[in-house]
Image: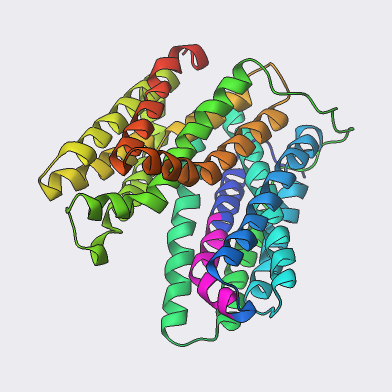
Amino acid sequence: MTPSADTAATRLATRLAFFAAGFAMSCWAPLVPFAKANVGAGDAQLGLLLLCLGIGSLLAMPVTGWISAQLGARSMILTGGIGMVLCLPPLVAVGEAWLLAGALLLFGASLGTIDVAMNVHAVEVEKAARRPLMSGFHALFSVGGFAGAGGMTLLLSQEVPPTAAAICGSAVALAAVLLAGPRLLKARAGEPPAFVRPRGLVLLLAALTAVTFLVEGALLDWSALLIVGRDLLEPAKGGLGYMLFSVAMTLGRLTGDRVVLALGDRRVLVLGGILALLGFVLMLLAEWTPLAMAGFVLIGLGAANLVPVLFSLAGRQTAMPAGLAVAAVTTTGYAGILAGPALVGFVAQATSLSAAFWMLAAMMALLPIFARVVARG
């Protein structure tokens, strides 16, 4: 029996897909040093190898959207989910750089596939529910990220061999994917539509998503350096800012559906963008460390529901098929994550790191500026 688009089962399946994707992706981070040692890579070579992960994701995302637009997201969620489960252990088992490059390419393609497909599925479920659900789905990705990174770190700290730890991580992700499988919306009959070039509203939604992801990626890689450079904390505690940002974002998404329901998409984009801007002001100007750290909390709370709202809007627009629109938004957002740290580095080299972060704040101002255009509710 084919489930209706909005049931307890389909919501659970969507949450499990988001959890599995976040869990598997974050399992990789603590394993990177072991993979680097196995293939004897230097820092420059590792950077090129890690680029394979991004390339795999960017190649898979448009194809996934094309297929999901007509045939449904279920098969692509399962394909991406099984793929990432199978690829994780080889990442720390191979001993040659070219094999690691291939494994990272496939791992990235699998992550890109499930990322697009689960968002397409989430759009369908949310449409049928006729109320906001996207923030809650994205919250499970964050929860999976905490669980994956924390669990893998715990195993490695107990001297579990990296390959065995990776297999344990794969087992957890596999369990989530298999639990989700029977509850996912069934595939639809039909032929995939022709590729449609993103245009109009979809281009604007993609650009705003890229900005939000770009800021998140920049905070991940540069916030500790900013904190230490401003003499707010010692180097060993430099990661506190991003940790506070991540916790605030997760909490914001766990409560985000109720916030979006109460305020509407446009107000969430306006108020979220303004709150994030205030956070940047505190982070960059406050001399008292607790107040500067509060800036990271405000950025996390403000940005928490921006991406879920943008994905929901992409799924509801009528300029192009929802699956292709979600793929365009996801691909552009992922490109923002990849480009953000490099952009901050270039600007910081030419001016200063503080100036680069003021640039990020100015980019976040685009969200409230264009909120009325992309969300008329």
Q: Quadrant of residue 66?
A: top right
User: Extreme front residue here?
Assistant: 350
Q: Residue 224, position in %: x, y?
A: 31, 55
Q: Residue 335, position in %: x, y?
A: 59, 40
Question: What residue appears at the point 11 percent right and 43 percent down from the top-left corner?
Answer: 287
Question: What residue appears at the point 32 percent right and 24 percent down from the top-left corner?
Answer: 271
User: Extreme right residue here?
Assistant: 191
Whether residue 76 sits left or right of residue 246 in the image: it is: right
Report the predominant secondary structure element of the magenta stretch: helix
Task: Say above or below: 328 vs 96.
Answer: above
Question: What residue appears at the point 73 percent right and 42 percent down from the top-left corner?
Answer: 73
Identify which residue, 312 or 109, lies in the foreground.
Answer: 109
- Whether residue 166 appears in magenta in the rendering, the answer is no
Q: Is residue 6 visible?
A: no
The quarter of the image holding the N terminus is top right
Whether residue 29 sits left or right of residue 104 in the image: it is: left
Q: Residue 285, position in %: x, y?
A: 17, 37
Q: Residue 281, position in %: x, y?
A: 23, 33
Q: Is residue 48 visible?
A: yes
Question: What residue appears at the point 69 percent right and 78 percent down from the top-left corner?
Answer: 94
What residue range appears in magenta?
Answer: 22-37
- Whether residue 33 appears in magenta in the rendering, the answer is yes
Q: Quadrant of residue 316?
A: top right
